[in-house]
Image (cartoon, rainbow, N blue to C red):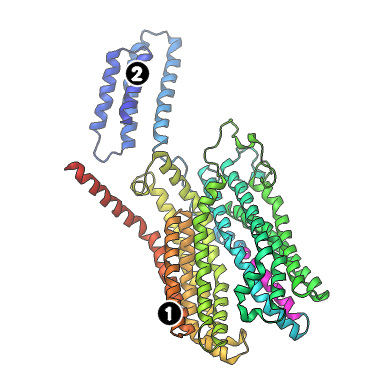
C-alpha cells in the first residue's frame, strides 16, 4: 500500500509543479506497471526504489519538454529541486526498511583479552578482600583467640558476600542497558565523553547511568538499615542454634556485619559505575579503583588487627574504609567519562536543558527507574536461583551421616568451584559488553517497522547483522569451553591428588578424592552456563532465562531432600549438581544455536494455521 501512496504523491507533486495531468497519469501508470513486471525474487524495497526511479524518469522527460519553453535561467534550479525531492523521497522510504548503521568489525582475540584481563581483576577483588581479612585475623592473637574469631568470621563474610551478590542484578542491568543505548545511538565506538566535546551527548546512555546510580544508592541505604536492625537474628538462623550457643561467636559475627553494612550504599554505587564503564569497554579504570581499595584494606588490617589487636571489628573497619576509598576513586573518572555535564544525578537532578539534544529535541528512549527495574527484575530471579541452589546443597550436606567430615568435604569442593567462577563469569561479562553493538540496531529496526523476531530473521537487511552477532557468540562460547576445560582440569587435581593443600585432616582428604570428578563436571558445565547466560542477557531473552532458572531451582530441592531423607552421601549431592549444570548448559546453548531455527519453524507453522481458516 505504501508504494502506491508514494507513486500518487509523486504524481500530485508533478501536477503541483505545473505538469500536465495526462503526463502525470502516464507516469503513474508506468510506475504501477513496474511493480507487477518486476522479477519474482525482487524484494519489496527494490520494487519501491524502482517505483521512485520510474516516476522520476518520467518526470524528468516531462521537464525536458517544459524546459523548451522555459528561460535558461530557470532550468538549472528546477532540475536541482526535482533531484532533491526524489532523493529525499528515496531516503525517507528506504531508511525505514533498512539498518542504516554499519556492521562493526568482528572483535579480534586480542581485544577480548585486553578487556577480559582487567575485568577478571574486578571479579577476583571481592574474594580477595575477604581473604585478606581472614589472613590477618587468623595470624593475629593466640591460637585459641584466632580460632574463635575465624569461626565467627566465616559465616559473617559469607553472609555479607551473599547480601552484596543479591544486588548484582543492578550491575547486570547497567552493563546491558548502557552498552545497548550506546550502540543504538551510534556511540558504541566513539571516544570517551571527556575526549569528544564535538560529539553530541548520548542522553539515553547517560540516563542509564543516572538511573542506575540513584537506584543503587537507594537499595544500598535500604539494605544497610535492614542489616543494622536484623543482622543478629538472621545470623542466628543462618549458623543454627547449636553454633549460636558458642560463647562470643554470634556477637562477634553480628558486630562484623553491622560495621560492614555501613559501606553497602557506596558498594552498590561502586558496582553500577564499574558496570557502566565496562559497558563502555573500559575495564582498566575500575581496576585502578580496586587497586586503591586493596591498598587501603591491607594497610588498615595491618594497623587495626595486627598492631592495635582490634580483631574482627578492626578487620570490618578496614574493609569498610577500603570500599569507601574505591568508590571515591571511581567517582571522578565516572563523572568525566559517563556524563557530559559531570553530574551523576545522585544528589542533584540535572537541569531540564541537559535532557535535550543540541537541536532542542527530546530523546524518546530515556531510561527511567521503572524501565530499569523492569529489566533488572528477571535478572534478580537468576541470582536468587543461584543462591538458593548452593544453599540447598549445603543444607543437604549438613544432613549426611558421619559429620563433620561430609560437610567439611562439601565445603572444600564448593570453595574450589567458586574459585573457578571468576574465570568463566568474565567471559559472560565480555559477551554482555561486545554483543550489544551488533544487536541494538536490529532491535531498533524491529521496533521501527513493527517486525517480530521470526520475521526479521528472514529479511536480507537483518541477516548480515545476525550472522556477525552469531560469529561473536560462537567465538565467546568456544573461549568458554576452552577456559572451562582448562580451569576444571587444574582445579580437580587438588582434591584428587593434593588434598593436603586444603586440610590436614586425613579423613577429609580421603573424603574429597571421589568428589574430584564431580567437581570437574560442575566446573566444566559452568562455562556454557555462564557464557550462554551472558549471550542471552545481551539478546534480551530474560523470560527464557527466568523460566529455566525457576524450573531447575524448583526441581533441585526435592531431589536433595530425598538424598537427605535417605541418608545419602555427598557424592550423590554433587552428582545431582552436575546434572543440574548440564541441564542449564543444554538449555542455554540450545537456545543460542537451535533456538532461531525452532522459532522460525514454529512461527511458520502458526502462520500457516492462521491462514488456513482464512483460505477456507
**Quick one: label 2 or label 1, which is nearer the N terminus?**
2
Picture quarter containing residue 305?
bottom right
In screen coordinates, is 585 left or right of 359? left
In screen coordinates, is 579 left or right of 337? left
Q: Position of residue 82 (x, y in %)?
A: 41, 20
Classified by dominant secondary structure, the portion drawn in magenta counts as helix
Picture quarter containing residue 132?
bottom right
- In-front residue for pair 416/387: 387
Q: Identify the disc placed on residue 574.
A: none
| Quadrant of image for the C terminus | top left
Picture quarter containing residue 322?
bottom right
Is residue 317 in view? yes
User: Residue tagged by mark 2?
Assistant: 12
Is residue 202 in view? no
Q: Which residues are magenta?
A: 121-139
Q: Residue at image x 32%, y 22%? A: 8
User: Residue tagged by mark 1?
Assistant: 562
| Residue 134 colored in magenta in the image | yes
Q: Position of residue 173 (x, y in %)?
A: 54, 54
Mark 1: secondary structure: helix
**Which residue extends farthest bottom?**
506
Q: Position of residue 428 (x, y in %)?
A: 51, 61
Amino acid at each position: 500500500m505504501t508504494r502506491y501512496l508514494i507513486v500518487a504523491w509523486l504524481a500530485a507533486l508533478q501536477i503541483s509543479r505545473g505538469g500536465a495531468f495526462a503526463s502525470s497519469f502516464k507516469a503513474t501508470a508506468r510506475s504501477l506497471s513496474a511493480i507487477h513486471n518486476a522479477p519474482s525474487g525482487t524484494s519489496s524495497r527494490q520494487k519501491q526504489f524502482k517505483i521512485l526511479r520510474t516516476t522520476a524518469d518520467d518526470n524528468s522527460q516531462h521537464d525536458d519538454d517544459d524546459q523548451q519553453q522555459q528561460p535558461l535561467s530557470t532550468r538549472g534550479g528546477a532540475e536541482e529541486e526535482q533531484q532533491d525531492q526524489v532523493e529525499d523521497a528515496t531516503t525517507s522510504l528506504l531508511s525505514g526498511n533498512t539498518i542504516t548503521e554499519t556492521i562493526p568489525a568482528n572483535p579480534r582475540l586480542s581485544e577480548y583479552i585486553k578487556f577480559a584481563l582487567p575485568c577478571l581483576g574486578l571479579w577476583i577483588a571481592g574474594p580477595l578482600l575477604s581473604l585478606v581479612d581472614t589472613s590477618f585475623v587468623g595470624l593475629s592473637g593466640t591460637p585459641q583467640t584466632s580460632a574463635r574469631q575465624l569461626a565467627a568470621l566465616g559465616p559473617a563474610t559469607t553472609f555479607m558476600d551473599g547480601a552484596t551478590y543479591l544486588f548484582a542484578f543492578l550491575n547486570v542491568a547497567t552493563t546491558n542497558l548502557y552498552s545497548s543505548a550506546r550502540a543504538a545511538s551510534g556511540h558504541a565506538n566513539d571516544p570517551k565523553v571527556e575526549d569528544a566535546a564535538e560529539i553530541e551527548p548520548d542522553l539515553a546512555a547517560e540516563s542509564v547511568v543516572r538511573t542506575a546510580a540513584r537506584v543503587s544508592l537507594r537499595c544500598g541505604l535500604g539494605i544497610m538499615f535492614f542489616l543494622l536492625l536484623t543482622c543478629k537474628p538472621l545470623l542466628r538462623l543462618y549458623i543454627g542454634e547449636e553454633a549460636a550457643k558458642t560463647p562470643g561467636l554470634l556477637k562477634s559475627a553480628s558486630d562484623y556485619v553491622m560495621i560492614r553494612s555501613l559501606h553497602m550504599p557506596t558498594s552498590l554505587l561502586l558496582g553500577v559505575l564499574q558496570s557502566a564503564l565496562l559497558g563502555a569497554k573500559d575495564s582498566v579504570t575500575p581496576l585502578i579503583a580496586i587497586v586503591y581499595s586493596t591498598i587501603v584494606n591491607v594497610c588498615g588490617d595491618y594497623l587495626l588487627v595486627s598492631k592495635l589487636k582490634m580483631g574482627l571489628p578492626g578487620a570490618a573497619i578496614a574493609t569498610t574504609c577500603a570500599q569507601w576509598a574505591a568508590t571515591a576513586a571511581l567517582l571522578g573518572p565516572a563523572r568525566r567519562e559517563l556524563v557530559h555535564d559531570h553530574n551523576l544525578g545522585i544528589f542533584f537532578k540535572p537541569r531540564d536543558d541537559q535532557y535535550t539534544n543540541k537541536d532542542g529535541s527530546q530523546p524518546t528512549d530515556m531510561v527511567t527507574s521503572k524501565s530499569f527495574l523492569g529489566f533488572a527484575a528477571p535478572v534478580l530471579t537468576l541470582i536468587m536461583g543461584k543462591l538458593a541452589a548452593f544453599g540447598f546443597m549445603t543444607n543437604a550436606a549438613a544432613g549426611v551421616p558421619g559429620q563433620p567430615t561430609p560437610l567439611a568435604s562439601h565445603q572444600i569442593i564448593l570453595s574450589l568451584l567458586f574459585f573457578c567462577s571468576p574465570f568463566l563469569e568474565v567471559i559472560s561479562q565480555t559477551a554482555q559488553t561486545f554483543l550489544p553493538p551488533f544487536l541494538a540496531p536490529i532491535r531498533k529496526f524491529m521496533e521501527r517497522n513493527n517486525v517480530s523476531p521470526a520475521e526479521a530473521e528472514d529479511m536480507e537487511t537483518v541477516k548480515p547483522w545476525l550472522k556477525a552477532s552469531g560469529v561473536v557468540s560462537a567465538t565467546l562460547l568456544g573461549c568458554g569451553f576452552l577456559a572451562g576445560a582448562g580451569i576444571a582440569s587444574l582445579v580437580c587435581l587438588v582434591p584428587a591428588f593434593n588434598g593436603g593443600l586444603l586440610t590436614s585432616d586425613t579423613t577429609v582428604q580421603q573424603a574429597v578424592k571421589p568428589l574430584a570428578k564431580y567437581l570437574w563436571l560442575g566446573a566444566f558445565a559452568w562455562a556454557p552456563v555462564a557464557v550462554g547466560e551472558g549471550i542471552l542477557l545481551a539478546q534480551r531473552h530474560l523470560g527464557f532465562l527466568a523460566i529455566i532458572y525457576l524450573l531447575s531451582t524448583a526441581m533441585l530441592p526435592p531431589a536433595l531432600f530425598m538424598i537427605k531423607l535417605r541418608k545419602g552421601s555427598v557424592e550423590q549431592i554433587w552428582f545431582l549438581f552436575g546434572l543440574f549444570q548440564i541441564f542449564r548448559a543444554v538449555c542455554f546453548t540450545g537456545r543460542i544455536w537451535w533456538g532461531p531455527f525452532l522459532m522460525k519453524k514454529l512461527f511458520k507453522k502458526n502462520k500457516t494455521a492462521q491462514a488456513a481458516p482464512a483460505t477456507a
